[in-house]
């Protein structure tokens, strides 16, 4: 018999080295940024001789933008500006993760830096205290890009038993979900829950409520942690909004939204005003709600599998086939928030939050 040689590193060996102590003043600072795809994340680490307490204390850094789709080879330095800091759940101790904005050589934003404009809008609308809660759906894949845990030939049984399912025949990859949840809590991300989704190997986690720019920051860092945790399990994450064609659910980024006035007694009146404004800007929102300016959502917003049709705006209480849903308890209490069900799983949370805030808070 011929043996097939495979090289793989062993996490238990790594653990021995991670337990080595490092001097108290040393900090491994990992700079994390969104690359030129607008979806994938990149990261690199440097040693600091102090332990930072705010991202403003971190040095501006740079990277080779020609290797990330963010610059030409002849003028390749792109700047990294740390803007949000988290505890590092992989290295523990004083080590940090820094979410960064990217700027070109001339100090203008790169095309996939959508945070700067989002922050400007959040600053303008700050008096209305906009809150967001995002439900990030995603799918686990084997390293051959096949849905994780699915039979290699054929399909699992049809959808029905999998949503919030329990049991080895219903869910795949719970280890990854559990590890990611803990990593988010440790890091300081406002993660509010998780559940298994309707399609096997599809899961969801929720971040929120977060006020203003923190929504995008926390969600992007939660995505980084998801990819990074899954890497340790040798599993791949996809945010494709329709990873399997046919009678299988797509993946969204439902965005729950409220202002202070919506959260106050009888705020339902404000919620309805917000929905009225949204009804006049459906196409602008669809353009902002996926990675490809509306093209990706064409595969997902079909009017089936608890989605609305991409062409029409609709709203309803407890109706999951609408663009906007007012949760039942919000209608009953006459205060709370609305849910925009249109954003796709690969949408940029900064652009989603900016667009909602412009329409509802700033009448732009
Ligand atoms: P669904 O019933 O649509 O699956 P989830 O429980 O998955 O809802 O998600 C609800 C989200 O709404 C959570 O992320 C939560 O943080 C968020 N949320 C709760 N209250 C508010 C609020 N007042 N404003 C904005 N988001 C909120
Ligand atoms: Mn949900
Ligand atoms: Mn869901
Ligand atoms: Mn939802």
Image: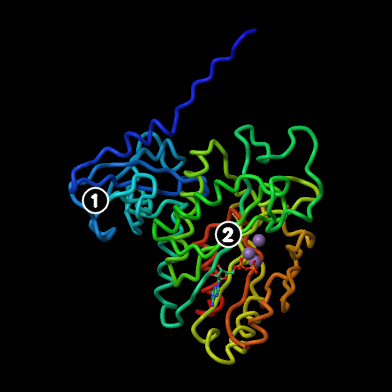
Rendered residue at 52%/45% (across/down): 37
Q: Which residue corresponds to mark 2?
A: 194
Mark 2 sits near ligand 1, with its Cβ under 8 Å away: no
* Residue drawn at point x = 49 percent, y = 21 percent: 7
Mark 1, other Cα within 10 Å: few <14 / some 14–19 / many ≥20 = few
Q: Work out whether 164 lies above or below 10.
A: below
Q: Residue 35: where, in percent of width, then height?
A: 46, 45
Q: Could you tell whether 78 is left or right of 348 in the image? A: left
Q: Is residue 4 left or right of residue 161?
A: left
**Residue depicted at 55% across the width and 91% down the height:** 265
Q: Position of residue 133 (x, y in %)?
A: 54, 68
In terms of depth relative to the viewer, which is nearer, 143 or 353? 143
> Height in image: 83 above or below 358?
above
Secondary structure of the residue carrying tag 2 is strand
Badge 1 element: loop
Residue denoted by label 1: 59
Q: Nearer the viewer, residue 286 or 170?
A: 170
Which one is in front, 318 or 23?
Answer: 23
> As displayed, is residue 284 above or below residue 295?
below
Rendered image quadrant of residue 90: top left
Percent coordinates x, y for residue 362 in the rendering: 50, 79
The 10 Å Cα crowd at callout 2, few under 14, some 14 to 19, many 20 or more, is: some
Q: Ligand 4 falls in which quarter?
A: bottom right
Relative height, residue 182 to residue 354 (above, below) = above
- View extreme (front): residue: 167
């Amino acid at each position: 018999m011929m043996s097939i040689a495979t090289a793989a590193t062993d996490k238990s060996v790594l653990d021995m080295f991670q337990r080595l102590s490092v001097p108290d003043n040393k900090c491994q600072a990992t700079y994390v940024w969104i690359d030129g795809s607008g979806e994938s994340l990149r990261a690199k680490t440097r040693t600091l001789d102090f332990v930072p307490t705010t991202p403003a204390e971190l040095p501006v850094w740079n990277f080779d933008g020609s290797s990330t789709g963010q610059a030409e080879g002849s003028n390749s330095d792109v700047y990294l500006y740390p803007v949000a800091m988290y505890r590092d759940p992989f290295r523990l101790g004083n080590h940090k993760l820094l979410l960064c904005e990217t700027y070109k050589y001339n100090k203008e934003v790169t095309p996939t830096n959508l945070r700067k404009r989002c922050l400007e809008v959040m600053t303008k609308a700050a008096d209305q205290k906009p809150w967001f809660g995002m439900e990030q759906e995603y799918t686990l894949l084997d390293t051959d890009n096949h849905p994780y845990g699915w039979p290699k030939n054929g399909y699992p049984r049809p959808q029905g038993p999998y949503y919030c399912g329990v049991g080895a025949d219903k869910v795949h990859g719970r280890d990854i979900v559990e590890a990611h949840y803990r990593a988010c809590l440790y890091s300081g991300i406002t993660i509010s829950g998780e559940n298994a989704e309707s399609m096997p190997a599809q899961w969801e986690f929720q971040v929120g409520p977060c006020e203003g720019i923190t929504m995008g920051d926390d969600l992007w860092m939660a995505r980084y942690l998801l990819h990074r945790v899954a890497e340790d399990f040798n599993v791949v994450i996809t945010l494709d909004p329709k990873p399997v064609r046919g009678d299988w659910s797509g993946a969204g980024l439902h965005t729950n939204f409220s202002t202070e006035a919506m959260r106050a007694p009888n705020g339902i009146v404000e919620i309805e005003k917000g929905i009225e404004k949204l009804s006049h800007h459906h196409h602008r929102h669809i353009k902002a709600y996926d990675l490809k300016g509306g093209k990706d959502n064409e595969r997902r917003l079909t009017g089936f599998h608890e989605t609305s049709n991409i062409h029409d705006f609709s709203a309803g209480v407890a109706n999951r086939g609408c663009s906007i849903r007012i949760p039942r308890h919000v209608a009953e209490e006459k205060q709370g928030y609305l849910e925009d069900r249109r954003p796709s799983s690969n949408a940029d949370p900064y652009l989603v939050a900016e667009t909602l805030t412009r329409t509802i808070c700033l009448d732009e």
